[in-house]
Amino acid sequence: MRFFHELIRTLAKQGDPYAKVLAAPDDPYPHYEELRARGVLYQSSLGTWVTTNHKLANEVLRDRRFGVRKANGEKAPEFMQFDNSMLGLDPPDHTRLRRMTTPTFNPRMAERWRTRAEKICHRLIDDLLATGDRFNLMTAFAQHLPIAVIADLVGIPEEHRRTFYVLSREITPLLDGVVTYEKKQSVDAALAGMTKLFTGIIAQRRADPRDDMISRMLPMVDEGRLSMAELVPLCMFLPLAGSETTVNLIGNGVLALLRHPEQWEMVAERPELAAGVAAETLRYDPPVQTYRRIAHEPIELAGVSLPVDGELAIVAGGANRDPDVFPDPARFDITRDIGADTLSFSSGIHYCLGASLAKMEAEVAYQVIISRMPRLRQAGPVRRRGSFIIRGMLEFPLSAS
Ligand code: HEM
């Protein structure tokens, strides 16, 4: 691992813009512009092909000749360890799992959770205001909302929530792409803890079914359409995918609003503009900056011959600032007409399952924060997560007065 970091540093010093991105700088956006200047498709000295071009990225994500595994079905190196979760599977397994989970995550279901999300937000703000004027938005507020919603949705009983919360925090480095040896030990221990926890919860839900995802999926296990070896990783992956991303949509959006006070005021006057804050934050500073695809056959792309198993990094954070699609892309503007154009939730068959839920949660969070703490201001420097994949803050000190 140390070797990998040294290699990245050396290549970055030699001017490789992708290596500069992998070094996880606080501000990756100038490096995306360097990548853009190198062409539609740039091959890093690490071998990976990289694109920040919106049109090309969209084409690749919808092209079935690309997958997330190697051409022979083996797991691609350094992929997240949820081999059986949807994100790590190609069709036909991907298609089967995705169909089974869709009923839990359709946009109508997301709206059903709005009132519950509002209640959670108000309770969190009551708690944080009761403990004083200064707080870290990430730990005092943003982390709790998505995890509470997803725990309800998946079907985690109240008595297991604390353990679930602690274990979830410990497996988050998996989303950062590169896991150090030390972190791997604690991640593996937490994964083993999660497996045990969910095996128990699934047994509980079997005995006492409720209106949640686990109860809805158990009959599929009984019918032989889904194996327990798939259900358990799915239960573990959803909370991770749903919380470590949404937490940063909340944080990144509040940061952008505080840096653009005129737009904060606009939302204070017209709370319905919170939907625009979520959409523009997803474009301007997306929580998932990059993901990748593997060529399953030799492919000619933008004048380049990609070999079988050639790896392509889609830099969504860069594609979202492609000037051919978004005029004046470095400007944060919550009134911008974005449509469905950003790649923040990917595109094609792996399009984020929780997109509607995440947008709803963020909207509610912005509205409640602005209405309850109209004089909110930054009270110290932010500390970032230090990941080239997940963009967010660990510390975001704020003062409510
Ligand atoms: C702001 C919040 C979120 C962001 C930015 C985000 C981003 C993404 C992205 C970029 C992908 C696709 C990666 C790829 O194509 O390789 C993805 C997939 C996925 N996301 Fe999200 N996500 C968010 C919230 C959620 C939530 C709330 C859930 C569920 C509760 C969720 C569940 C999933 C699942 C299951 C997949 C895999 C879908 C598949 O492989 O078919 N995400 N997400």
Image (cartoon, rainbow, N blue to C red):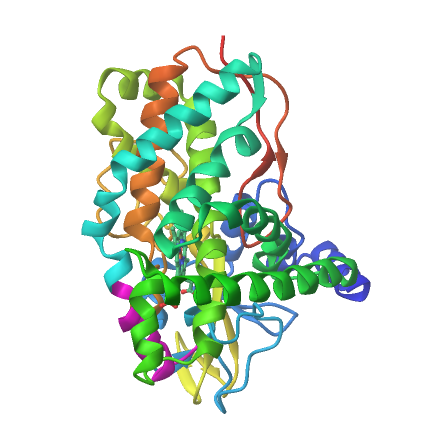
Q: Residue at x 27, y 52 (%)?
A: 341
Q: Residue at x 58, y 21 (%)?
A: 135
- Residue closest to the far top: 401
| Quarter of the view holding residue 191 | bottom right
| Quarter of the view holding residue 374 | top left
- Residue closest to the far bottom: 72
Left or right of 125 in this view: 224: left
Left or right of 31 in this view: 216: left
Percent across and percent down for residue 156 are 44, 53
Q: Residue at x 56, y 67 (%)?
A: 80
Of residues 126 and 51, which is closer to you in this image? 126
Q: Is residue 237 magenta?
A: no
Of residues 207 and 196, which is closer to you in this image? 207
Of residues 265 and 329, which is closer to you in this image? 265
- Residue closest to the far front: 207
Percent across and percent down for residue 226 are 36, 80
Percent across and percent down for residue 62 are 30, 72
Does residue 226 appear anywhere in the picture? yes
Q: Residue at x 31, y 25 (%)?
A: 367
Q: Quadrant of the N terminus?
A: bottom right
Percent across and percent down for residue 387 are 61, 50
Number of marks in the rendered image: 0
State whether residue 144 is above or below residue 325.
above
State whether residue 285 is above or below residue 9.
above
- Residue closest to the far left: 108
Does residue 51 appear anywhere in the picture? no
State whether residue 280 is above or below residue 296.
above
Please tell me in which quarter of the rendered image ligand 1 is found: bottom left
Q: Main secondary structure of the magenta part?
A: helix
Q: Which residues are magenta?
A: 89-102
